[in-house]
Amino acid sequence: MQPAFAARVLRGAKELGVHTTLDTSGFLGAHATDAMLDDTDLVLLDVKSGDPETYRRVTGRDLEPTLVFGRRLAARGRRVWLRFVLVPGLTDAVDNVEKVAAYAAELEQIRPGTVERVEVLPFHQMGREKWHALGRSYELEDTQPPTAELTERVREQFRAHGLATY
């Protein structure tokens, strides 16, 4: 949301020899200049769904800008940790996970070594109170965290594509 400011911080950090990481959904990735990306050592890229309809339901945004940004990162040789939040009943469908895994594998085809790891992040309810404090409706109120078996199934889907997955 503030690319000029972020670019200055990243440039200053690099000049000081400080490792830099950009944590993003990639939705606004088109606002990141090439120079800004050159000053970024690692990108934590959240891909919340591989299915455009589910992605829109989860984020209220289009999936395509995120996919385009990831491809741009791969083409520029930026290191990526792809993060996927596993929400039972929302993002856990085999086909949905497979689309995200195939996308991560695609980034690896563009430039091997791009996706250093995939982090499957099990959903939790730690943010529930924030929603309540804000007086907002929390759609995931009754959603339970995924079981260990479901989490492992999803991790195995990523591993089947040759991706280091945690």
Image: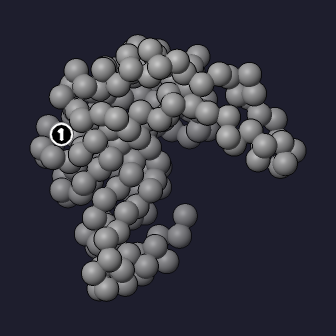
Mark 1, other Cα within 10 Å: few <14 / some 14–19 / many ≥20:
many
- 123 over 42 or under it: above or below: above
State the image coordinates of residue 86 (x, y, percent, origin top left).
Answer: 50, 28
Residue at 74 percent of width and 22 percent of height? 142
Task: Determine which residue is flagged by label 1.
Answer: 108
Q: How many marks?
A: 1
| Spot occupied by residue 137 in the image (x, y as percentages of width and height) | 81, 35
Give the x, y percent position of residue 40. Answer: 31, 67
Q: Is residue 131 above or below residue 143?
A: below
Give 166 or 74, whichever is nearer the viewer: 166
Quadrant into which the C terminus falls: top left
Residue placed most toward the observer, 93 or 165: 165
Q: Quadrant of residue 76?
A: bottom left
Q: Amino acid at mark 1?
A: Glu
- The residue at 32%/77% (across/down) is 18
- Residue 47, by quadrant, is top left
Q: Residue at x 44, y 22 (%)?
A: 151
| Image location of residue 81, percent across then percent down | 33, 47
